[in-house]
Amino acid sequence: MIEALRKKAEELLKNKTVDVVYGYGEGSVPERTRPVFITKPEDVNKLTWNKYCVYNLTTYLKKQESRKLGKPAIVVKGCDAKTITVLIKESQIKREDIYIIGVTCTGIGDPPATKCKACDVNTPLIYDELIGEKIGNKEFSFEERYAELDEYEKLSEQEKWDFWQKQFEKCIKCYACSSICPLCFCDRCIVDKNQPQWIDPSAHPRGNLSWNVTRAYHLAGRCINCEECQRVCPADIPLNLLNKKLAKETEKNFKYRSGYNVDDELAMATYKEDDNQDFIK
Amino acid sequence: MDNIYTPYLMNISDVTDEAPGVRTFRLNFQNEDEGKNFKFQAGQFALYSAFGYGESTFCIASSPTRKDYVECTFRQAGRVTNALSELNAGDTIGFRGPYGNVFPIEEWEGKNLVFVAGGIALPPLRSVIWNCLDLRDKYKNITIVYGAKTVADLVYKNELKEWTARDDVNLVTTVDPGGETPDWTGKVGFVPTVVEETAPDSKDTIAIVCGPPIMIKFTLPVLEKLGFKQDKVYTTLENRMKCGLGKCGRCNIGCTYICKEGPVFTAEEISKMPDEF
Amino acid sequence: MEKTLKKEKLNSLITGLKDKGYKTIAPKKDNNLITLCEIQEADEIHFDHVQTNNSIKEYFLPKTEKILSYTIEKTKVSIEEPEGFAVKSVVFGSRPCDAASLPIMDKVFNWDCTDKFWIERREAITIVTIACDKCDSYCFCTSVCLAPDAKQGSDVLLTKISDDEYLVETETEKGEGLIKELETVFSEPPSGTPDRQVATVEKKFEIDKVKPWLDENFVHKIWAEFSTKCIGCGACTFVCPTCHCFDIVDECTMSKGDRVKNWDGCQFKMFTLHTSGHNPRSTQDQRWRQRIMHKFKYYVEKFDNILCVGCGRCSRVCPADMNISEMLEIISTDEGQPEPVSKE
Ligand SMILES: Cc1cc2nc3c(=O)[nH]c(=O)nc-3n(C[C@H](O)[C@H](O)[C@H](O)COP(=O)(O)OP(=O)(O)OC[C@H]3O[C@@H](n4cnc5c(N)ncnc54)[C@H](O)[C@@H]3O)c2cc1C
Ligand code: SF4
Ligand code: SF4
Ligand code: SF4
Ligand code: SF4
Ligand code: SF4
Ligand code: FES
């Protein structure tokens, strides 16, 4: 697979289909990889693929420093590819402005990431070139998809509140969760807006609660469950639980799953005259 | 131990509207003893607080020769400056300072002075201009070139009149092309061009330049052409500041902390700094 | 002064500290993290780790702290000074690198004027360090003139000499005072030379070569090449024991307000943004350069110390695998260059 990946990258760079390939490279320690940006065909050997390729590289589509390198080809797993669908729907990128190198994936992380347990996109749903043997995507029931919420949902309202209070207390307001999120692309995040000051900038219980809740809400119906925010949180806050809960509510209420189909109407940004909820009328 | 972040409490004793969105406060110490012991020099700045909103950095715009009060002139730009402009005479604001270095006006004695200011950047110069005017005998010719976008944007209009009337000051005012009014008697043109036309003699002369980065960028070469050596040209730098005390870590350009080692620098010092303005 | 501490005496030590009015801060396991936090019992203390996830800094420069409170009444404002922030405490079991960060940062917090929030806490807190008996590939204390058993900043240094015994060495009067207060907990020093169990930390680069390179290479393409992957989150600066940048903001409800100091860092794009919209460090390579320059050049020139203790936290935590010692290796060895060093 690595060979096929490198060959494809070399070809894309050589015939100038793209200027840069965002891919995975060897990391600082054997248990890590790191994002690499290949601009020369002779450097394609820096590309790798293994179970440590956790990054959702689509996040670099929002960064001026990587965008400066020119038209990208981007290596994506099935979960990452869902981001692209959302970014297209939300008018952040045009399909033709990027080249998608999809890789088939049977799970990453050591121990394996939670998202991989009920993964239904082992083969990406959107790509220009597929690397690896095509795998028939599995199907899971609604319950199976949100199984990780089972324990949490058994808690009482009070217990849930206490749980999150305790978790959010740890937040240090580094904003790594939003910096890494490919769908947190606002140039000026709500936390940077101070007129009025929507979110207390301090990392005290009130400020942390409003930040974490707002971040999750802004991703509701959009989050594609790449789990990157949770991976990077230095305070080990189970952000994924929050995202997953919102995804579940969205699916339940709107029959919408983010990132699966470019033709689906966005759950949170679609106006319908005959909306079944009356607040909108 | 003293809390270095505690501001003095000041009364706003006077409010002057200078130009659209630009306002001057005259401030008096609520505690008289603090006022008596307070000293500063031209060029220094302070942090002014709108309680409930935060602190903002402005230079001290009044002259150290005028005791009993300090003045600041600010442009409404964001959270704190908007809150400040909601305040009226009689209200309380916080004042932390004076911070930073000073214009070495004693070294300038016996020399000609040329002040060049653009837009809202007259306040930092106003302190040193009045300082020198109040010690008028110590300096030779004093020239002031001041420009703004439009006539309405010129600040300290009364003082401009006063300086025009004085024959020991040569004031040249200018507005950007299109910014003039029918009754405008000053020049029309950008500050660097007007400096070139005014052509102050560089011999035995100190130039002090304050303004937006773009104005400074184009004025410095003009001064060089007129024969000013880099160490005879002074300017002030502005960087985002929070503490003003060399602690919060955000105001440095290379090794230089603007809040402590600045804001006053010679063009020569600036030319040695890394390009990160 | 030299003593020994038997592991079985830990209980008496922690209860002793409590009895003498100290708050105890020590490493504790919390899910996937090892956190330096307040503990009540000796058995909460976690020993078998390389490094705590949070650094010691938050006990001296908390992530958020009140520096002023005020009450607004019509046109008048009255100010109240915060009190009780410096609590008599012992940090037990922090690492030598963390302890070493403290005297380094004293310099900036004492520069011309004293930040009492830092200094009063420094006076109130006693540091009992445990020398590292293991390390990981991110540690590089030995490359920045420190060691896994460095004494800088510690009041007391504990070094493992057997599975159930530490050698206790006092480094300051404060440390000596603490040991004397709890004399009965400690035993006499061993006779003969104790077998100090100290990790071997590989030296990764020649620090002497770093600053001369930085002096010459403010403009260099490596800044951008190395940092394209950096996402500009502040994680590295927040976990770093020597990063001390902060923001000051007001938080107010109707008539009562607090002025607070919050952690901030040079990797955020908002950090230097002028109100006009102009930003002197508008791209991530400039911000990454600031981080390296500040730590290995600016601070050295100003305060004669490197602003890095080699704890490796920034690299462990970095979501994009930016590795600071790798950067320093590259710039300190010509051979290490991915491409020949050329200005561009
Ligand atoms: C030494 C020195 C002297 C100065 N002297 C003067 C003076 O005499 N008079 C004067 O008027 N000014 C002066 N300034 C500039 C002045 O400090 C700023 O204009 C002022 O602090 C703005 O503060 P604010 O609180 O109103 O803006 P805030 O709202 O607090 O801005 C805070 C931060 O939010 C961001 N921000 C806010 N609004 C925007 C926006 N629209 N777009 C992008 N980012 C934004 C910026 O990062 C800004 O730094 C001086 C500055 C320095 C450093
Ligand atoms: S990454 Fe974690 S610690 Fe950082 S702001 Fe987000 S939730 Fe808080
Ligand atoms: S919120 Fe988290 S899981 Fe969802 S898209 Fe963003 S980074 Fe991925
Ligand atoms: S170096 Fe890593 S931790 Fe630091 S800002 Fe960049 S991505 Fe975040
Ligand atoms: S820069 Fe990194 S290695 Fe150095 S002290 Fe900070 S966190 Fe530790
Ligand atoms: S590296 Fe950055 S955040 Fe850390 S102390 Fe230096 S300027 Fe501040
Ligand atoms: S303003 Fe805080 S260090 Fe200069």
Image: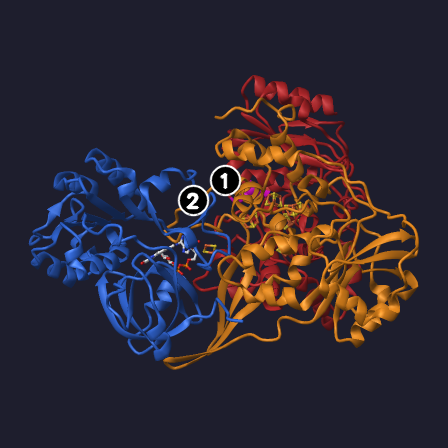
Chain colours: A red, B blue, C orange
Label 2 belongs to which residue?
A: C280
Q: What residue sits 69% from the left and 66% below the top?
A: C125
Question: Quick check: C35 left or right of A278?
Answer: right
Q: Residues within 10 Å of mark 1 (few under 14, many from 20)?
A: some
Q: Relative to B138, say whether A139 is above or below.
A: above
> Who is closer to the viewer here, B101 or C332?
B101
Q: What residue sits 69% from the left and 71% below the top?
A: C88
Q: Which mark is residue C266?
A: none
Residue type at tag 1: Gln
Label 1 belongs to which residue?
A: C286
Q: Residues within 10 Å of mark 2 (few under 14, many from 20)?
A: many
Tell me which numbered mark, 1 or 2, is placed earlier along the sequence.
2
Q: What residue sits 10% from the left and 55% below the top?
A: B168
* Residues at marks 1 and 2 touching, judged by CB atoms closer than 8 Å: yes
The answer to whether dots 1 and 2 both sit on one chain is yes
Question: Quick check: B94 left or right of C9?
Answer: left
Q: Picture coordinates of residue B118 (x, y %)? A: 24, 49
Question: Quick check: B97 left or right of A220?
Answer: left
Question: Quick check: B170 left or right of C3?
Answer: left
Chain of residue at mark 1 = C
Q: Picture coordinates of residue B260 (x, y %)? A: 43, 54
Q: Picture coordinates of residue A107 (x, y %)? A: 78, 39
> Who is closer to the viewer here, B142 or A156?
B142
Residue type at tag 2: Pro
Number of marks in picture: 2
